[in-house]
């Protein structure tokens, strides 16, 4: 099947279902049918899905966490989305053996205490592409008058189609970026830690984005004043945080900077192909910082 672009507004549990169901339609399998989103108990983490990719023999879990975690020492708590990779699965107890390779997207945050947001009633405005290789999601939480540290984010789960060399590792990686990262650190509960890069099963990066490189020009991607074309580079994925071992490139997204002729809503069409990317610039209810990325829009 061809990939699909989704957009709209949904609660996190419904968004997890949309992504998981599409991945299954694209050839993944349900890793554990007891993991579903029917239990939406407030304050619990039971709305979740488990997917299995047979080629890489890897499990991917997507969990809606309505339980909050200390994300920045003891000054910031957040609820959100946990994404994790697992090499094995406990089919008796219906759980994973560890949580070493994961990220946490803290959409709903509040300083000093538990957010009032209910993940099962608060919507995310989102843009998402899903195909057989994985998904890219950009989402912004709706505002409320109490929670003061809500963030927007991009998170990407992708299987690299063609690696530069045989490394004995899975083809997958996860990249996550928040629109404002002053609210996130390596302090706090490790289960609520946002890892910018996760390359299972070799490293996770908790603070900076070592492990992935975007074009480091002034505008990352830009529209030419001469011929009106867009020039960009697909991000490089590395097997190490020192970025000395490139292993592949993304086919799902690239970064752009506002000010280089590209703005939110622009569509970039690839010469000689039907593929298109949609430029999305997104701030959050509590910060004007933006995540600016072009995500796959048409196959």
Image (tube, grey):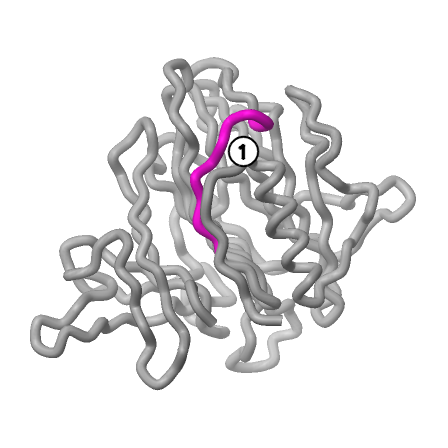
**Residue at 88% across / 40% down in the picture?**
93
Residue 127 counted in the magenta span: yes
Disc 1: which residue: 80
In percent of width and height, residue 200 lies at 61, 59
The quarter of the picture where residue 286 lies is: top left
Residue 134: image quadrant is bottom right
Main SS class of the magenta portion in the image: strand
- Give the residue at x 60% y 51%: 19
Between 181 and 279, which is closer to the camera in this rendering? 279
Q: On the picture, is 40 further left or further right than 284? A: right
Does the magenta segment cover residue 100? no
Q: Which residue occupies 57% across, 65% down?
A: 131
Quadrant holding the N terminus: bottom right
Q: As drawn, which residue projects farthest toward the left?
A: 226
Query: In the rendered view, would you say 104 is above or below 175?
Result: above
Front position in the image: 9 or 194: 9
Where is residue 268 drawn, in percent x and y? 30, 68
Residue under the image location 42 percent in, 63 percent down: 297
Q: Which stretch is magenta?
A: 119-128
In this rendering, position of residue 220 left or right of residue 49: left
Q: Give the SS element for disc 1.
A: strand
Number of residues whose C-alpha sits closer than 10 Å to that of mark 1, classed few (under 14), some (14–19) or many (20 or more): many
């Amino acid at each position: 099947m061809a990939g699909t672009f989704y957009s709209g507004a949904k609660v996190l549990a419904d968004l997890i279902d949309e992504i998981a169901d599409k991945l299954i339609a694209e050839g993944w399998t349900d890793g554990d049918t007891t993991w579903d989103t029917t239990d939406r108990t407030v304050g619990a983490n039971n709305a979740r899905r488990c997917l299995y990719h047979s080629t890489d023999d890897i499990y991917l879990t997507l969990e809606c966490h309505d339980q909050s975690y200390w994300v920045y020492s003891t000054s910031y708590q957040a609820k959100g989305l946990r994404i994790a990779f697992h090499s094995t699965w406990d089919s008796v107890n219906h759980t994973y053996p560890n949580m070493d390779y994961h990220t946490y997207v803290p959409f709903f945050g509040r300083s000093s205490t538990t957010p009032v947001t209910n993940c099962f009633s608060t919507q995310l405005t989102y843009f998402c592409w899903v195909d057989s290789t994985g998904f890219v999601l950009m989402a912004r939480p709706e505002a409320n008058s109490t929670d003061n540290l809500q963030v927007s984010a991009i998170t990407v789960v992708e299987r690299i189609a063609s690696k530069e060399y045989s490394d004995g590792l899975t083809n997958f990686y996860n990249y996550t970026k928040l629109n404002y990262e002053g609210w996130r650190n390596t302090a706090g509960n490790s289960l609520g830690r946002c890892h910018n890069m996760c390359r299972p099963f070799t490293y996770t990066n908790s603070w900076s984005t070592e492990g992935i490189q975007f074009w480091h020009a002034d505008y990352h991607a830009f529209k030419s004043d001469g011929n009106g074309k867009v020039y960009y580079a697909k991000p490089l994925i590395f097997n190490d945080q020192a970025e000395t071992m490139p292993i592949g490139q993304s086919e799902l997204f690239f970064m752009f900077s506002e000010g280089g002729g590209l703005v939110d809503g622009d569509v970039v069409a690839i010469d000689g192909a039907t593929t298109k990317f949609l430029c999305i610039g997104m701030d959050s209810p509590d910060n004007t910082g933006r995540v600016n990325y072009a995500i796959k829009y048409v196959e």
